[in-house]
Amino acid sequence: MRKKNYYVCLLCCAMLMILFTGCGGASQKETTPDTAKNTEEETAQTETEETDAAGETSSGITFEAKDLEGNTVTESVFSDAKLTMVNVWATYCNPCLSEMPELGELAAEYDAAEFQIIGIVSDVQEGMETEAVDYASSLVTQTGAAYPHLLLNESLFYAMLSEVSAVPTTFFIDENGAVLDTVVGARDKTSWKEKIDALLAE
């Protein structure tokens, strides 16, 4: 019980941090320099990971979570496609909701074996009241973001969200579970497509 209370407190602190930071609605110009710097660092890290024995990466991403439909999803989902885009969003975040219709379009335009999108609802926890889950589901329907959306829990928080300080934050992950790039802020469909195509071509 004490451990559970600690976890709830920790998640509340994390969500408060996101609330104080606000939505990461930065423009592409504002995010590009940092992204370019991060890409160089992460590319070097990825190259190091690829030299591990038996060709396995050392990304260490492991989780088990429920999606909005109640299905269990684990890190094995990354092996379903060459590239996975993980979009962390919140129900209160206008930039998040504004980009989700185009993310839904992108999810439908690519071969599922090449590219997939997974959403993480950062402000709706697994086990919360039905109303909160229903509200998140209604936003997904309204925006046409017809791809899986995971509910936050302890496993998912420690695996991917412990350092997320703003929404939307988007991770690009390969089929081995290695993070290739991280983008803070919303982008339009054209910008996302350029990034997706570049990562698929590597």
Image (cartoon, helix red, strand yellow):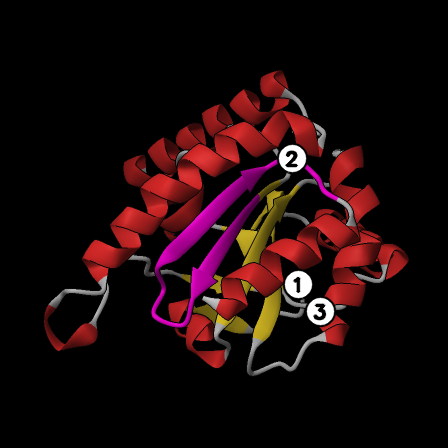
The dot on residue 107 is 3
- Element on which disc 2 rests: loop
The dot on residue 185 is 2
Occupied quadrant, residue 25:
top right
Amino acid bearing label 2: Gly
Q: Above or below — where is 83 with respect to 93?
A: below
CA distance for labels 1 and 2:
23 Å
Q: Position of residue 124 (x, y in %)?
A: 62, 45
The residue positioned 77% from the left and 36% from the top of the image is 95
Q: Nearer the viewer, residue 44 or 169?
A: 44
Q: Can residue 195 be seen by looking at this rendering? A: yes
Q: Position of residue 181 (x, y in %)?
A: 46, 48
CA distance for labels 3 and 2:
19 Å
Q: Callout 3: 10 Å neighbours few (<14), some, many (20+)? A: some
Residue at the left extreme of this rendering:
53
Which of marks 2 and 3 precedes in the sequence? 3
Amino acid bearing label 1: Leu
Q: Nearer the viewer, residue 173 or 191?
A: 191
CA distance for labels 3 and 1:
17 Å
For disc 1, the marked residue is: 68
Q: Is residue 60 magenta?
A: no
Write the start and end of the magenta stretch as one range. Answer: 170-187
Q: Callout 2: 10 Å neighbours few (<14), some, many (20+)? A: many
